[in-house]
Image (cartoon, rainbow, N blue to C red):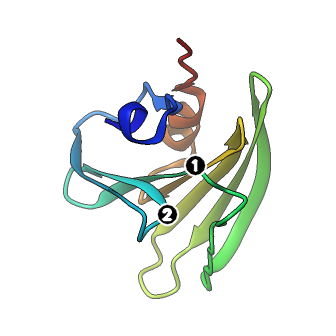
């Protein structure tokens, strides 16, 4: 559906942790792109956000939680900025992974997973071309 609606094939997450289920996809002009929601068991969540017209919109990430670390991962020719936060209210971990490919912005928000699983998700990103 993304290819038909937006005219591109998005980068896919080929690895997802065990017991991950797709919850819903939200598409539209009002959110300026695509939001895909996944659940892992009872607590953990993954939100995959794709913004095809990044020149007109950007990720307005306003995270007031405590940043624990920030580092870069290289996957092919993409540089992925990964940040770990501690959620102030609950003490849980939140991760963000942000990158750009062919003028499309991607953001993956992950809650309540360990770094090893987060990096497996990132390393499992795959570019599909026609």
Residue that sits furthest to the top in the current view: 130
Left or right for 31, reference 1 = right
Quarter of the image for residue 35 reads bottom left
* Above-or-below relation of 21 to 130: below
The residue positioned 62% from the left and 74% from the top of the image is 61
Residue 9 image point, x, y percent: 49, 28
Which residue does the numbered mark 1 point to in the structure image?
52
Left or right for 4, reference 70 = left
Q: Are marks 1 and 2 in contact (CB under 8 Å)?
A: no
Left or right for 26, reference 29 = left
Q: Nearer the viewer, residue 23 or 52?
A: 52
Would you call the spot at circle 1 few (<14 residues within 10 Å), some (14-19), or many (20 or more)?
A: many
The residue positioned 62% from the left and 81% from the top of the image is 62
Q: Quadrant of the N terminus?
A: top left
Q: CA distance from mark 1 to mark 2?
A: 8 Å
Residue 33 image point, x, y percent: 47, 56
* Above-or-below relation of 114 to 120: below
Disc 1 is placed on an element classified as: loop
Residue 130 image point, x, y percent: 53, 11
The label on residue 32 is 2
Left or right for 85, reference 8 = right
Q: Nearer the viewer, residue 5 or 23?
A: 5
Would you call the spot at circle 2 few (<14 residues within 10 Å), some (14-19), or many (20 or more)?
A: some
Disc nearer the start of the sequence (1/2): 2
Residue 88 image point, x, y percent: 52, 85
The residue positioned 65% from the left and 79% from the top of the image is 66
């Amino acid at each position: 559906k993304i290819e038909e609606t937006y005219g591109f094939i998005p980068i896919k997450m080929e690895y997802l942790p065990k017991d991950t289920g797709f919850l819903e996809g939200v598409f539209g002009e009002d959110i300026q792109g695509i939001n895909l929601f996944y659940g892992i068991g009872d607590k953990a969540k993954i939100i995959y956000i794709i913004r095809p017209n990044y020149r007109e919109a950007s990720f307005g990430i306003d995270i007031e939680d405590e940043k624990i670390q920030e580092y870069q991962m290289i996957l092919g020719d993409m540089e992925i900025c990964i940040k770990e936060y501690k959620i102030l209210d609950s003490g849980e971990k939140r991760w963000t992974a942000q990158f750009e490919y062919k003028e499309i912005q991607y953001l993956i928000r992950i809650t309540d997973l360990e770094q090893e699983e987060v990096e497996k998700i990132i390393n499992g990103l795959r570019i599909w071309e026609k």
